[in-house]
Image (cartoon, grey):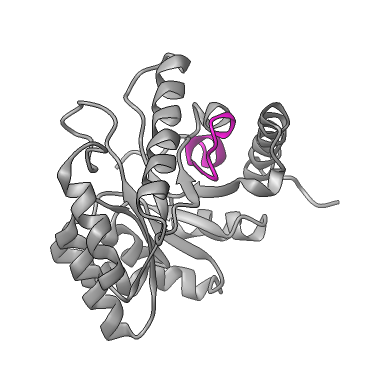
Amino acid sequence: METVTAFQENLARIEECIHRACRRAGRPREAVRLMAVSKTHPAEAIAEAVAAGVTLIGENRVQEFESKRPRLTELGITNAEIHLIGHLQSNKSTRAAELFSAIDTVDSLRLAQRLNDAAGKLGRPLPILIEIKLSSEPAKTGLDPAGPDLRTLLQRLPGLAHLRLRGLMTIPPLDDRPETARASFHTLRTVRDTLAQQFPGLDFSELSMGMSGDFEIAIEEGSTLIRIGTALFGERPRP
């Protein structure tokens, strides 16, 4: 008899919650993708996620994932879709384009231009999300949804031939109140709808929002991609 792992148990619980949230929102389960966030967890944890059927993985740092990659190759993990979901400095854009399937935290025209150049040299399109900042917290990164930098980036994107905009992402304020997260997610959906009207030639279909503590609310507010770390893998290992 096959032993059920802690990861599989966690995954089953999360799947139940996703189904429940989708029913409340009147959405099909297929409308929401589950990303397993493996930051600080070893390559073996990624392999376990893939074995359990979760092939969309989120990593926070270029160097950290680069250190895991040889072990993943040894483990035969070649079919996973790995996204960078942490802040990316523009001087690391070339390596990020080489390592990741997509970059979900583009927050400046300069970074977009560098990623476009890197993807061009690799000869492949690079999917991206634009990170939107919806809180005043200094540690948060992203573009002001009402600021000129976002408009400038969106105006220039059609000329960046190797980038493929897929939509927007955000991280809600550090606040345990569900209404705070809901307000942020509702705002991002409203921003997306407005931008989609203003820039009809761009793809805004993806809304990456919702993490372990608030993903059901995010689904109710229209998330198409939830990023789950602790609820899947357990507490992160301490360095």
Looking at this view, is 8 or 129 the one in front?
A: 129
**Residue 23 location in percent, x, y?**
73, 31
Is-magenta flag for residue 178? no
> Residue at position x 30%, y 77% from top?
119
> Which residues lie in the magenta part?
219-234
When the figure is inspected, residue 50 is found, relative to residue 23, above or below; the finding is below
> Residue at position x 28%, y 82% from top?
120
Looking at this view, is 17 or 44 the one in front?
A: 17
> Residue at position x 43%, y 13% from top?
177
In-image side of 49 versus 112 (left or right): right
The residue furthest right is 1
Looking at this view, is 149 or 123 the one in front?
A: 149
Does residue 151 appear anywhere in the picture? yes
Number of disc labels: 0
> Residue at position x 51%, y 36% from top?
234
Does residue 39 appear anywhere in the picture? no
Looking at this view, is 114 or 161 the one in front?
A: 161
**Residue 148 location in percent, x, y?**
16, 45
When the figure is inspected, residue 158 is found, relative to residue 209, above or below; the finding is below
**Residue 71 location in percent, x, y?**
44, 69
In-image side of 183 versus 11 (left or right): left
Is-magenta flag for residue 230? yes
**Residue 15 location in percent, x, y?**
69, 39
When the figure is inspected, residue 201 is found, relative to residue 74, above or below; the finding is above
In-image side of 226 versus 176 (left or right): right
Q: Quadrant of residue 238?
A: top left
Q: Quadrant of the C terminus?
A: top left
Q: Quadrant of residue 184?
A: top left
Q: Quadrant of residue 179?
A: top left
